[in-house]
Image: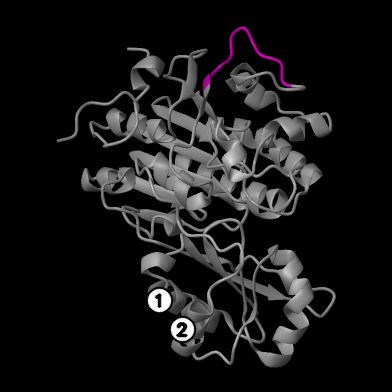
Amino acid sequence: MQQPHSFNRIVLIVLDGLGSGEMPDAAEWGDAGSDTLGHILQSRDVRLPNLRRYGLGNIRPLQGVPPLDQPAGSYGRCALRSNGKDTTTGHWEMAGIILEKAFPTYPNGFPSAVIDHFIRETGVPGILGNIPASGTEIIKDLGEEHVKTAKPIVYTSGDSVFQIAAHEQVIPLPRLYEICETARRMLDGEHKVGRVIARPFLGEPGAFYRTENRHDYAVPPPPENLLVALDDEGLDVVCIGKIASIYDSNGVTQDLTAKNNQQSIDQTINALKAESRGLIFSNLVDFDMLYGHRRDTEGFARALEHFDSRLPEIEAAMGDGDLMFITADHGNDPTYPGSDHTREYAPLLVYGKGARAGVDLGTRDSLADIGQTIAENFGIRLTAGRSFLADISKD
């Protein structure tokens, strides 16, 4: 039974890959010294006046973002308690799912038995690749051969992903998606990867480029999670960008398409302007996809400035009973060697006209604290996480 709540609607914005400093176990993941936000801010003068106003500079010392005596929001950081550092792990943890066992990864490519099974089940003429690789680099290296042979390019990364790249004029999108759906079904048991990802591209040899027709096929989450619990209470669960795919659409009441940061911000504003009661859950993918993995520090900095510049629009669309969380799902330090995610804390900013300001929320044990706070607001209890609703509520 739903209880009275402090906030009518909560918007949760995930800045994909924006870690804020190495976690204590970072060295075990090969990520000692990683610091996505800190290193970006050290790279040049990055102007983030609105994030600073919410308390970004109060979380920890940050170059160019000094703390405020009276920030407009509350602030802290969240550890990632789950065993992992990928999109699925971070987002699931926000919804109250703690993964004790990490999804499998394949630093040497997939076993031949997996590839043979994939070829048999999908009917493709073979595959190219089967290595860990940057998506932009592998289409540069193997794209021409793919066009000649029609063999899809299969690759992975440091994350638990089975990625399938194909030229849209060689393997049309419906066929690529069908291949990915088949791969999702067959990758089970010990090879149950976190996500199968369609990675379509276009262009000519020497000028191949990825399109925005990416599609993710996630493992269905356990049913005991925030999104399902909210839906069961008759509340709205509006998902933007890749959020719905991360939860296999479980508990999602509305899925708003967004292929990049600009569209995700636009859709977040649209959702705030529409009538709803519950959760608006938005992912800004460009930080991770375009700049973190590609180790583009300048691009990451520009994207942060762009997001910051649009925060007043988001704030203006919020009603008096709305509350906003800004956080991340993992790190992806663009200054770090390699091209993979990094094991870092996630920043946490909380703002609402009806919320207390200037509260130091400290270092949270888990991203699940976010989910538990949202759950408590709507009279729900999750199995993981410690709510901080009382800390930010005025009454």
Q: Residues within 10 Å of mark 1 (few under 14, many from 20)?
A: some
Left or right of 32 on screen, residue 83: left
Residue 291 in percent (x, y) is at 72, 50
| Location of residue 374 (image quadrant) | top left
Residue 191 in percent (x, y) is at 43, 67
**Residue bearing the label numbered 1:** 186
**Residue interval drawn in magenta:** 65-75
Left or right of 362 on screen, residue 275: left
Left or right of 232 on screen, residue 267: right
Gap in angstroms between the C-alphas marked 2 and 1: 8 Å
Q: Quadrant of the N terminus?
A: top left
What residue is shown at x 37% (from left), y 59% (from top)? 249
Pointer 2 and pointer 1: residues touching (CB < 8 Å)? yes
Q: Nearer the viewer, residue 92 or 226?
A: 92
Residue 113 colored in magenta in the image? no
Q: What element does badge 2 sit on?
A: helix
Q: Is residue 170 above or below residue 386?
A: below
What residue is shown at x 70% (from left), y 24% (from top)? 49
Earlier in the chain: of badge 2 and badge 1, it is 2
**Residue bearing the label numbered 2:** 117
What residue is shown at x 40% (from left), y 76% (from top)? 186
Q: Quadrant of the C terminus?
A: top left
- Kindly identify the amino acid type of the residue bearing the numbered disc 1: Met
Q: Is residue 11 above or below residue 92?
A: above
Q: Is residue 61 above or below residue 119?
A: above
Q: Main secondary structure of the magenta part?
A: loop
